[in-house]
Amino acid sequence: MRIIKKLAFTSVLATTALVVAACGSSGTATTTSPSVSSTGGSTGASTAAALPQTSATSFKRDFSSMADLKPLAAKGTGKIQVILPDTVTSARYTEFDAPYLEKAFAAAGLPSDQFSVQNAQGSDATQLTDAQSAISAGAKVLVVDPLDSGVGAKIESYAKEHGAQVVDYDRLTLGGQRAYYVSFDNVNVGKLIGNGLVSCATAWGVTKPNVIVMTGDPTDNNATLFAKGYNSVLNPLFSSGGWTKVAEPAGTWDPPTAVTEFTQAFTAHSNTNAVLVPNDENAAPIITYLKNHNTKPKTFPVTGQDATLVGLQNILSGYQCGTAYKPIYLEAQAAAALAIYLRAGVTPPAGLVNGTTQDTKSNVTVPSVLLTPEWVTTQNMNSTVIADQFVTASQLCTSSFTAACTTAGITP
């Protein structure tokens, strides 16, 4: 998925016309990850030697590679505004995205008065107003994780009318007009979750899985992509008759709603012995419900995503199979890099824009940075989330999890 390809400046100039045509709008998306030649933005009057050749694989845990973008940060004008969606669907936005984005911009040498990170607190109206206010205050580039495609499209239309460019962050705006999209390969995220459930069912001795398949919010394009991934794994098993899908609730990213959906399905199908859940936050109250109904560890497979503290502890305790981990420090640096290239009027190199995402609502292909997720279990928890300091060993290995941490090779 990640292809490093050095792009000569002459090639950048030659492909500028194609770039302009490629930077249209976006919809229900499928993703591909072959390298693309050049996308978005307009080239400045720089020499080839002055153009940083940042790639999707160049970002480091310590953010040191962002320093390569200092010439572009000095060259560009206008502000960069990041608008994150909420603080409910995942703790990641306040715990990781916001500080990582700020760290990435600072490491690239962007002055603190030239960038800002806000959170819409779950309000479409707030997210739109934040975007409009930012543009009025001089923002030339917006990095937006839209609450939904409706507000995302409004933001992108307004930005285009006022001469600002938009990078879709983590979620694609369906029917939007962004320049780029940066995220993880979300179909692959879904495949990791599906395969994780299959492996877990085998390891835990669930020979005839009767599965409730939970989904994310149907208005979120990421939920669509996750489902495409895990359904590609599970549907053949359901079709063969070895596995049974007993229910598939409507879908949500709200944990209280998720546990209500689950309990209704579980009550209606008492033979249920596994559940696919597309994120840790929704899985947590479901696991609490199962514990309260005397479900024993390693008997009822439950999946997750985001490598949250509660998710990792549920894995350690034998109630969750694993979690799809997306190293957010990579995503934040990629988004910051794209924004800095756009602010400087320079086309990002093909090594950075390493894939495409299809927006089927607008029927356009969106140039994308697609990063690689990982499936985390007790076997690799220490070498992934702990090594990345996504969660510290001291946070994870509290008294009730000390023995499980020791077994997993994690030392506080």
Image (tube, rainbow, N blue to C red):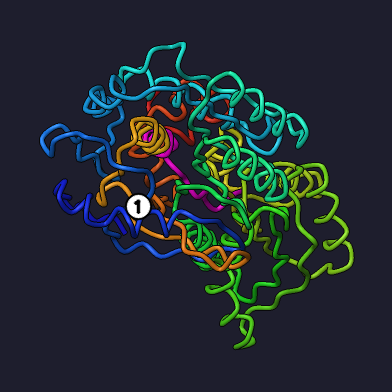
Q: Nearer the viewer, residue 144 or 205?
A: 144
Is any part of residue 194 visible from this angle? yes
Residue located at (38% from left, 12% from top): 111
Quadrant containing the C terminus in the rendered view? top left
Q: Identify the residue at image location x=64%, y=78%.
A: 243
In the image, residue 35 lies at what x, y percent? 28, 60
Is residue 327 rendered magenta in the image? Answer: yes
Q: Mark 1 highlights which residue?
A: 39
For image coordinates 60% across by 40% down, the residue present is 161
Residue numbers of the magenta segment: 320-333
- Dot 1: within a 10 Å radius of its alpha carbon, few (fewer than 14), some, or many (20 or more) residues? many
- Relative placement, left or right, of 239 versus 202 is right
91 lies left or right of 184: right
Answer above or below: position of 281 versus 150. Answer: above
In magenta stretch: residue 214: no
Instruction: Please identify the quadrant where the N terminus is shown.
Output: bottom left
| Kind of residue indicated by mark 1 | Thr
Residue 319 position within the rendered picture, expressed as x and y whole percent measured from the top left? 62, 48
Front residue of 161/397: it is 161
Work out whether residue 384 or residue 165 is closer to the camera in this orientation and state it.
Answer: 165
